Every structure is written in structure tokens, then in C-alpha cells.
Amino acid sequence: MNKPQHVAIIMDGNGRWAERRGQPRAIGHRKGVEAVRNAVKAAGENGVKYLTLFAFSSENWNRPQQEVSDLMGLLKFFVRRDLAELHNENVRVHVIGDRRGLSADILALLTEAEDLTRENTALNLVIAFNYGGRDDVTRATRTIAQKVAQGLVDPARITEQTISDCLDTADIPDPDLIIRTSGEMRISNFLLWQSAYSEFIFLPCLWPDFDEEEFRKALKEYACRDRRFGATTDRAAAAAT
Ligand code: FPP
């Protein structure tokens, strides 16, 4: 079966999950953390090497202050509670997104998670936190512009690889598959540059209901996709071998 090396997920629908039950949105986010655990487990069991989770976007600051604070609290709760187990399971944690603007305690926890798990070799868990695709490209552009100003980079020699190397995902392969839950069909400023040739699967289930069965269903659908990267089927197959 054709398997994705990198699966990225837009975890959507926590609020609706809670509202449908007459509960506060915070309860939906809390259930969402359980679904995160399911996704990590399912990714590992299905031989996925990179799992990226869109946990907090650069636009999520526009939510009510209490909800922003709930989401920050849940990230801290997740890292504090699950880091030892992730490390035990040989999971390497990466964090992408703009670290400026994050509180000192969140920064310290994220750095601790990355440092502790740096040598791990099973699953790579990439947490996108305060992440926006346009912001990623903007920050990369600034880095390249600084190098040009210092005479380190010749503008005529800037390639796609130069840009990829300056993104937060420099050491991470592009996602093969992007899953979005909750039936919404848009990318919402997720991995804009990196998703140029990703396959998309939109699942109707709300994120708190996402489980190993949903993950397997998505992998099965991915296996039927014919990825051509702009070429013809036979040429794409030849390039892949
Ligand atoms: C979208 O649902 C979900 C989010 C904005 C946050 C996702 C966060 C978590 C699942 C918990 C923390 C994550 C980690 C990695 C510990 P929504 O609130 O937009 O739902 P709605 O569209 O139904 O309102």
C-alpha cells in the first residue's frame, strides 16, 4: 500500500463538538487533546514518519481572550503530561511557528520537549504553534534579505531550495497528505509553500471524534491517489524509483 511519509492535520471542529452537546468550547478543546493522543498513536502504528498538527494559528489570537488562554493552557497540559511518554516511545518533537509573542513558560516547555527528544528516531511529531503559512514565508524572506544585504547570498542564485531552507520546516519533508476534519474545505494559512503537491482529504468528523479508525480510512483513501507532481503517471512513477 502506498503510504504517506508525512501527514499534516488541520484539527477542526472542537467548538462545534462542544456546542452540539450544550457544553463550553473549552470542553471541545480538551477532548481535542485526547484526539491528539489517538493521532500520535495511529501515526506510529501505521509507519508514518512525520505527523504535523496545527495546534494554534497566527490568526487564533483573534479568538476571545479566555479561549486563547484555554488553548495555551492545553498545550502546557499536553507537554507536561505526555512528554515523558512521547520520549519513551522514541518520538521526536519539533515545533514550528513564530516563537516571538509566546510566553516564557510556553517557550521553556517547547524547548524542553525539543531538547529532550532530539535524538529520537521513531515518529517526528511537529507541533505547529503560533504558525501561519504566510508568516513562515515572510520570516524566510526576511532571513534571505538579510543574507543578501550582508553579501552572503547572490539574489540571482536564489532557488526554491534557498526558500525551503529558510522556512520553519527546513529539516522536515513536505507533507504528502493533509487531512482536515469537520467538513470545512480550506487550507486556512497552514503549510502554504510546503503543500504545493500534497494530497488533501477532508473528513466530515469533528476533531474530538477523530480516532484510529478515521486515520486508517484516510490512509486507505491516500493509497488510491495517483500522485503525478505535474508529470504524467508513467514519468512520475519512473521519477519515484
Ligand atoms: C479548531 O477547532 C481547533 C483549534 C483552533 C485548536 C486545536 C487544539 C487542540 C486540539 C488542543 C491542543 C493541541 C495540542 C497539540 C496539545 P475550532 O475551535 O475552530 O472548532 P469550530 O470550528 O467547531 O469552532
Image (cartoon, grey):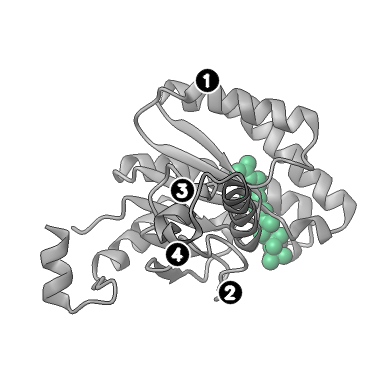
Q: Quadrant of the N terminus?
A: bottom left
The disc at residue 116 is 1
- Mark 3–mark 4 contact, CB under 8 Å? no
Q: Position of residue 139 (x, y in %)?
A: 64, 52
**As shown in the figure, which amino acid type bears the numbered disc 2?**
Glu
**As shown in the figure, which amino acid type bears the numbered disc 3?**
Asp
> In the figure, is residue 19 to the left or right of 160?
right
Which residue is situated farthest in the bottom direction here?
232
Q: Is mark 3 on a helix, strand or loop?
A: helix
The disc at residue 184 is 2
Q: Can you tell me whether the CB of the residue at mark 2 lies under 8 Å from the nearest atom of ligand 1? A: yes
Q: In which quarter of the image is the C terminus?
A: bottom left
**As shown in the figure, which amino acid type bears the numbered disc 1?**
Leu
User: What residue lies at 68% left-to-right and 38% top-to-bottom?
Assistant: 75
Residues at marks 3 and 4, CA–CA distance in whole angstroms? 15 Å
Which residue is situated farthest in the right direction here?
65
Does residue 80 appear in this view? Answer: yes
In this orientation, which residue lies closer to the viewer: 234 or 11?
234
Q: Is mark 2 on a helix, strand or loop?
A: loop
Residues at marks 3 and 2, CA–CA distance in whole angstroms? 31 Å
Quadrant location, ligand no. 1? bottom right
Q: Mark 4 points at which residue?
A: 195
Question: Of the residues under marks 2 and 4, which one precedes in the sequence?
Answer: 2
Q: Mark 3 points at which residue?
A: 165
Question: Of the residues under marks 3 and 2, which one precedes in the sequence?
Answer: 3
- Mark 3–mark 1 contact, CB under 8 Å? no
Q: Where is residue 41 in the image (x, y as percent from the top left)?
A: 42, 40
Label 1 crowd (10 A; few <14 / some 14-19 / many >=20): some
